């Protein structure tokens, strides 16, 4: 009986790990016959697990049921889930903090001692900074927007800009993008007849969604690159372009989302488009790349900001 129960747990773990299994492959992994696999599958079904037979071939799939069945996680998966729940309990999505803590308490209660020690050690060794968190977004809004993206359905929304201006928009949502502490929706704006990015914390969706539309190709061929360009250029009052004497891949690794956009020039050089609130901010961003560069374009006050920075550096080393 113990051997059969252990085999059922092993079978359930295999079905949860991969979508489709042939009966022969399961029998080989479990060291039994295909007939035994069929009997074990029937036992799982009796326990309420929706194990489906694959059409046209002798195989099985664990389908979705009416309730969430117990999950079998290996050590690394369990630790990853705990870390994810801890992060979600203090994250940028509103309304899931308490739910995350409840799920975390249930999982930690059944962790083996060796895993409990690992996650507690991680918690004790981790310090949350005192920096202000980013704006929280509604979990319900995220679900509505994500579902409209998946179904390629038009979405009506109320939007408030950074200046407080309010408007009603009708869009064709493409993708949700999480950049740093903010969530953004990249969508085709039907009123502007152009791509636009919207801060999700400023969106109030107005369901029901509209008709389905053919999906559009992403802007700039890459929605993340498009949003990075929007954040680093359009949103900032001071902008500059420099040519850097290093390959684009090397420079891209030093750029975080919203800081700038890297464009290859040739195999050894690239151009970088940056944005900041002030000329001094541009100087800090440019010099933080730690590479030789040449200024291509920038505001008139940028030259003076570079001279001030150079003076401070010379005085710091005594000459």
Image (cartoon, grey):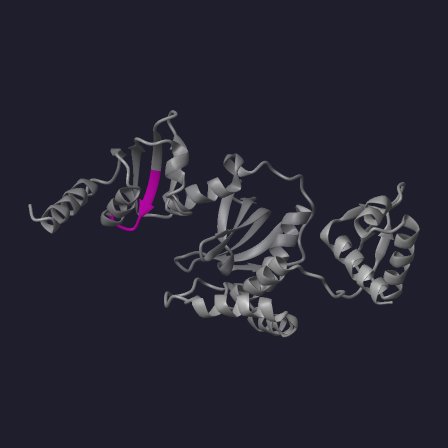
Looking at the image, which is closer to me, 152 or 165?
A: 152
**Residue drawn at 41 percent across, 67 percent down:** 127
Picture coordinates of residue 236, whole percent (x, y): 34, 48
Q: Is 277 covered by the magenta stretch?
A: yes
**Residue drawn at 72 percent across, 52 percent down:** 17
**Residue drawn at 79 percent across, 47 percent down:** 20
Rendering quarter of residue 119: bottom right
Question: Can residue 153 be seen by looking at this rendering?
Answer: no
Q: Judge whether 231 appears above or below 108 on screen.
A: above
The residue sitting at the left extreme is: 319
Q: Is 53 covered by the magenta stretch?
A: no
Picture coordinates of residue 80, whole percent (x, y): 58, 59
Q: What is the total number of numbered labels drawn onto the structure image?
A: 0
Q: Is residue 166 left or right of residue 218?
A: left
Looking at the image, which is closer to me, 161 or 142?
A: 142
Q: Judge whether 106 appears above or below 35 on screen.
A: below
Quarter of the picture containing the C terminus is top left
Picture coordinates of residue 152, whole percent (x, y): 66, 46
Quarter of the picture containing the N terminus is bottom right
Which SS does the magenta portion mostly show? strand
Picture coordinates of residue 44, whole percent (x, y): 85, 61
Q: Which residues are magenta?
A: 273-278
Q: Is residue 227 left or right of residue 291?
A: right
The residue sitting at the top extreme is: 266
Q: Is residue 218 left or right of residue 106?
A: left
Question: Can residue 185 be seen by looking at this rendering?
Answer: yes
Q: Judge whether 134 appears above or below 292 on screen.
A: below
């Amino acid at each position: 009986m113990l051997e059969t129960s252990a085999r059922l747990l092993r079978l359930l773990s295999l079905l949860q790990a991969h979508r489709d299994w042939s009966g022969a492959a399961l029998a080989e992994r479990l060291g039994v016959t295909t007939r035994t696999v069929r009997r074990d599958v029937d036992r799982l079904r009796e326990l309420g697990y929706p194990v489906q037979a694959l059409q046209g071939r002798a195989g099985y799939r664990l389908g979705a049921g009416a309730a969430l069945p117990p999950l079998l996680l290996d050590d690394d998966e369990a630790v990853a889930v705990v870390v994810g729940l801890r992060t979600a309990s203090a994250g940028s999505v509103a309304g899931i903090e308490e739910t995350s803590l409840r799920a975390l308490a249930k999982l930690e209660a059944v962790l083996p001692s060796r895993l409990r020690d690992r996650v507690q050690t991680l918690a004790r060794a981790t310090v949350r900074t005192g920096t202000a968190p980013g704006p929280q977004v509604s979990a319900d809004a995220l679900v509505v927007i994500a579902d409209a993206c998946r179904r390629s359905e038009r979405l009506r929304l109320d939007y408030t800009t950074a200046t407080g201006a309010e408007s009603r928009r009708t869009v064709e949502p493409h993708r949700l993008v999480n950049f740093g502490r903010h969530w953004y929706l990249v969508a085709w704006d039907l009123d502007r007849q152009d791509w636009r990015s919207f801060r999700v914390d400023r969106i109030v969706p107005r369901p029901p969604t509209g008709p389905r539309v053919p999906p559009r190709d992403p802007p700039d061929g890459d929605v993340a690159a498009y949003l990075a360009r929007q954040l680093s250029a359009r949103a900032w009052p001071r902008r500059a372009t420099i040519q850097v004497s290093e390959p684009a891949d090397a420079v891209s690794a030093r750029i975080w989302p919203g800081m700038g956009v890297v464009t290859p020039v040739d195999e050894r050089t690239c151009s970088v488009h940056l944005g900041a609130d002030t000329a001094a901010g541009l100087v800090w961003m440019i010099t933080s790349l730690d590479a030789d560069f040449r200024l291509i374009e920038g505001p008139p006050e940028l030259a003076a900001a570079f001279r001030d920075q150079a003076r401070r550096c010379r005085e710091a080393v005594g000459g």
